[in-house]
Image: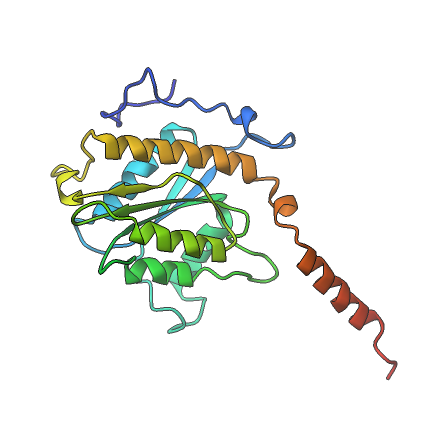
Amino acid sequence: MPDLSDLPNIDPAYFPVIDFSHYASANDDGHPPRILILYGSLRDRSYSRFSAEEAERLLTAMGADVRIFDPTGLPAPDSVEPDHPKVAELRDLAFWSEGMVWSTPERHGAMTGIMKTQIDWLPLSLGGVRPTQGRALALMQVCGGSQSFNAVNQLRILGRWMRMVTIPNQSSVAKAWDEFDDNGRMKPSPYYNRIVDVMEELVKFTLMVRGRDAILTNRYSERVESAAALSARVNQPKL
């Protein structure tokens, strides 16, 4: 049984104990799923960060290896070279990960600028390797008022553009200011239970996708393009 001492809202009798072998490919070595979490607010009392931290605790209890990226100091896209320390840190974590969680506030009916900045720094391709293609993705948002899904819907579009496998479930926490205590811990509620659902689904999808991404993302159009490039190279006229 996992250690649930830091999860006071959880009923141990129903907490998901995930058997990796039920979801992983035949040649999977069984290592913990590597999950990167991004959040979209720099406030001291950031509810998207609190949600991300709750997700980290849940994922860890489910057997995942989790990293949270702190976006403080991340420059605007294209304002610096990619070797900037914060950009390099983010990209290294993206390469390391096998799944991701994106957690953002909804501001003016959309995701925040710092959330989009992090995603914009993730390249579709770098050195022939795609740091997001084929990775599982879970989406969460926090709302200052009534429940909305504008931000997660936008993130779902971005996940598709990044060629990620976005899981069906998602989380949207209404009136987030009333859902966390003074220590930044989430109170028991259906919103909390939904985050548990989302993290459980993410672990399962991450296990199902990893080791199979080369097969799942193999595309006719790219095979044709690669064949044409090879033909052009080997049939160059002699100089």
Could you say where residue 225 lies in the image, as x and y percent from the top left? 71, 64
Residue 130 at least partly seen: yes
In screen coordinates, is 45 left or right of 112? left
The residue at 49%/47% (across/down) is 96
From this view, report whether residue 36 is shown above or below residue 119.
above
> In the image shown, does 204 or 183 lie closer to the viewer?
204
Quadrant location of the N terminus in the rendered image: top left
Residue 163: x and y in percent read 52, 53
- Compared to residue 208, the image places residue 172 above or below, namely below
x 79%, y 71%: residue: 233
Which x, y percent locates residue 165?
50, 46
Q: Residue at x 39, y 23 (%)?
A: 16
For residue 230, above or below residue 214: below
Percent x, y for residue 5? 27, 23
How many labels, in total?
A: 0
Q: Residue furthest bottom?
A: 239
Q: For the view shown, which residue lies furthest in the top direction?
A: 13
Query: Observer-nearest residue: 92 or 28?
Result: 28
Q: Residue at x 20, y 29 (%)?
A: 188
The colour scheme used to paint the residues is rainbow
Q: Quadrant of the C terminus?
A: bottom right
Q: Is any part of residue 39 visible from this angle? A: no
Answer left or right for 176 relative to 62.
left
Nearer the observer, 103 or 58: 103
